Image (cartoon, grey):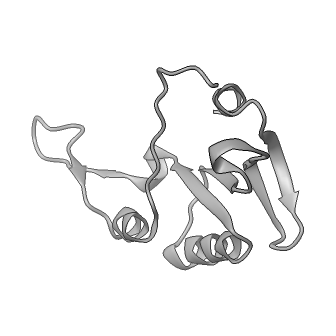
Amino acid sequence: MYNWLKGKFPNAFVEFEVYIPTTRQIADIYVEHQDGEYKGMKWAFEFQHSPLTIPQWEERHNLYESVSIQDFWIFDKSKFMKFSSARDYTDARKRVDFDEYICKKQVWYTFSMSKKPT
């Protein structure tokens, strides 16, 4: 992810484990855009492997939001997804409250990975 972001946004500040003093959080990857279409935008990428409750996620999300940082979360499949135990469907996903809640709260962004940065 870090290398992809550096390549996709070569003029942006992109760094691992950046401490954000105003929220007292450490973003796993932090991006601050210096120019272009995203100038002034700040992003925090969180790779969540440990258990996290909805209230804990909400607090962290709101802290980022309070300082105009768009947060992106990548959740560990083994911790945050539940799978059906139905016969012959080993990867059939069941809906769970946590992912449904977050999906309703977040804005979704997509980027083309086939184009080279300009």
| Residue displayed at 55% across by 54% down | 73
With respect to residue 15, does 3 lie above or below?
A: above
Residue reaching furthest front?
Answer: 36
Give the left or right position of residue 76, taking residue 82 as reference.
right
Where is 106 relative to 108, above or below?
below
Residue 23, position as x, y percentages in the image = 80, 73
* The one of 19 and 118 positioned closer to us in this rendering: 118
Q: Which quarter of the image is occupied by the N terminus?
A: top right
In the depicted structure, whether residue 3 falls above or below residue 107:
above
- Report the front residue among 16 and 33: 33
Q: Number of labelled discs?
A: 0
Residue at 74% from the left image edge and 56% from the top image edge: 40
Q: Give left or right: position of 91 versus 103.
A: left
Is residue 11 depicted above or below 61 in this figure? above
Left or right for 115, reference 61:
left
User: Residue 115 at x, y = what percent?
Assistant: 51, 21
Residue 52: quarter of image: bottom right
Which x, y percent locates residue 89? 15, 38
Residue at image location 21% in from the left, 49% down from the top:
84
Q: Residue visible at 84% across and 70% down? A: 24
- Residue 37: percent from left, percent from top: 63, 46
The quarter in which the C terminus is drawn is: top right
Q: Which residue extends farthest left? A: 87
Q: Say left or right for 98 vs 95.
A: right
